[in-house]
Image (cartoon, helix red, strand yellow):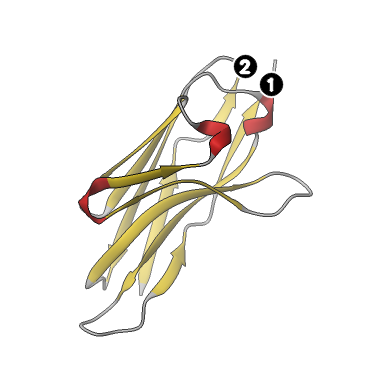
Amino acid sequence: QVRLVESGGGLVQPGGSLRLSCAASGNIYSINAMAWYRQAPGKERELVADIAKGDTTNYADSVKGRFTISGDNRAVSLQMNSLKPEDTGVYYCNLRGQRWYRGTTSDYWGQGTQVTVSS
């Protein structure tokens, strides 16, 4: 079983900063990538940023220059600066990988952490 535990959400004023962290545990053979997604009320879940093997990163256009994703072994963090009200939502940690040698590549999700940007 793979478990992802997120932390670091909360309420922050526009222009402020937050740092989200996610730690993975359980039976994991190989990780292809880890990522952060978010879902705003009434909207679909969207990719915020991901980091793949070799530390290749990818960001949504809406967060480029403001957010930074970093990874270390089985953990991933998201530093969020210059936050805007439109960044509000539930942020989910994602891991894509295999649980054993030549196993199926699957997606695993954390329970989500609320980020609210409001004055």
On the image, the x and y values in percent for residue 40 come to 69, 44
Nearer to me, 63 or 4: 63
Distance (Cα) linking label 2 and label 1: 6 Å
Q: Is residue 22 visible?
A: yes
Left or right of 5: which side holds 15?
right
What numbered label is drawn on residue 14? 2
Nearer to me, 4 or 43: 43
On the image, the x and y values in percent for residue 23 come to 32, 51
For this orientation, the residue located farthest to the front is: 61
Identify the residue at image location x=44%, y=69%: 107
Disc 1 target residue:
118
Identify the residue at image location x=63%, y=54%: 45
Identify the residue at image location x=41%, y=74%: 106
Left or right of 39: which side holds 42?
right
- Disc 2 crowd rating (10 Å Cα; few below 14, some 14-19, many 20+) is some
On the image, the x and y values in percent for residue 28 come to 26, 70
Nearer to me, 52 or 94: 52
Amino acid type indicated by mark 1: Ser
Look at the numbered disc 2 and give the secondary structure of its residue: loop
Marks 2 and 1 close (CB-CB < 8 Å): yes
Identify the residue at image location x=28%, y=64%: 31
Compared to residue 75, the image places residue 60 above or below, namely above
In this rendering, the count of numbered labels is 2
Question: Mark 1 or mark 2, which is nearer the start of the sequence?
Answer: 2
Compared to residue 85, the image places residue 104 above or below, namely below
On-image quarter of the N terminus: bottom left
Compared to residue 13, the image places residue 11 above or below, namely below
On the image, the x and y values in percent for residue 95 come to 39, 61
Image quadrant where residue 87 sits: top right
Q: Is residue 72 visible?
A: no
What numbered label is drawn on residue 40? none
